[in-house]
Image (tube, rainbow, N blue to C red):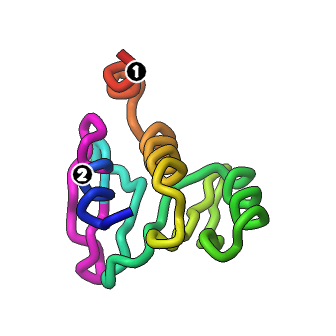
């Protein structure tokens, strides 16, 4: 997926704002909580996920997905944007957003 298209997908979710991360990279937040980080070179996307989903995706396709850090029930998934399937990437972005967004914004998306 083209990075410009990916950015539009992310920003198209209700309540999403783009911020500058600690290293100058784009960080996407909903209600001031991060759910996605774009690498400085725009080749990788870090997404919030559940631990089980991170483990399954890394096991399924280690060329596209790699584990990042984990804490509690959440883990972060490192995605090679160019190698990822576009539809799967859209779904993963939406799921990362759902793990972070408040219920009223999720209801707005589902409406």
The 10 Å Cα crowd at callout 2, few under 14, some 14 to 19, many 20 or more, is: few
> Which quarter shows the N terminus?
bottom left
Which residue is at the front of the view, 103 or 47?
47
Which residue is at the front of the view, 50 or 81?
81
> Which quarter shows the C terminus?
top left
Q: Position of residue 63 (x, y in %)?
A: 65, 76
Q: Secondary structure at mark 1?
A: helix
Task: Give the residue drawn at x 69%, y 51%.
Answer: 53
Task: Give the residue drawn at x 37%, y 55%.
Answer: 34
Q: Position of residue 46 (x, y in %)?
A: 47, 66
Quadrant of residue 27 within the rendered picture = bottom left
The magenta stretch is 10-27
Circle 2 residue: 8
16 relative to 94 in the view: left or right? left
The 10 Å Cα crowd at callout 1, few under 14, some 14 to 19, many 20 or more, is: few
How far apart are the two marked residues, 1 and 2, measured between alpha carbons? Answer: 18 Å
Circle 1 residue: 110
In this view, 71 is above or below 80: above
Q: Is residue 17 magenta?
A: yes
107 relative to 51 in the view: left or right? left
Q: Secondary structure at mark 2?
A: helix
Q: Position of residue 93 (x, y in %)?
A: 45, 49
Task: Give the residue drawn at x 44%, y 42%.
Answer: 94
Mark number, residue 15: none
80 relative to 11 in the view: left or right? right
| Dot placed on the residue nearer the N-terminal end, 1 or 2 | 2
How many marks overall? Answer: 2
Q: Is residue 48 magenta?
A: no
Tell me the mark number nearer the camera, choosing from 1 and 2. 2
């Amino acid at each position: 997926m083209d990075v410009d298209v990916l950015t539009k997908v992310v920003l198209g979710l209700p309540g999403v704002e783009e911020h500058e991360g600690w290293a100058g990279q784009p960080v996407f937040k909903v209600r001031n909580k991060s759910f996605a980080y774009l690498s400085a070179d725009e080749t990788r996307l870090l997404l919030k996920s559940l631990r089980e989903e991170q483990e399954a995706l890394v096991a399924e396709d280690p060329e596209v997905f790699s584990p990042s850090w984990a804490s509690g029930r959440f883990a972060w998934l490192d995605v090679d944007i160019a190698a990822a399937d576009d539809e799967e990437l859209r779904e993963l972005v939406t799921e990362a957003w759902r793990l972070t967004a408040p219920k009223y914004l999720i209801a707005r998306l589902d409406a």
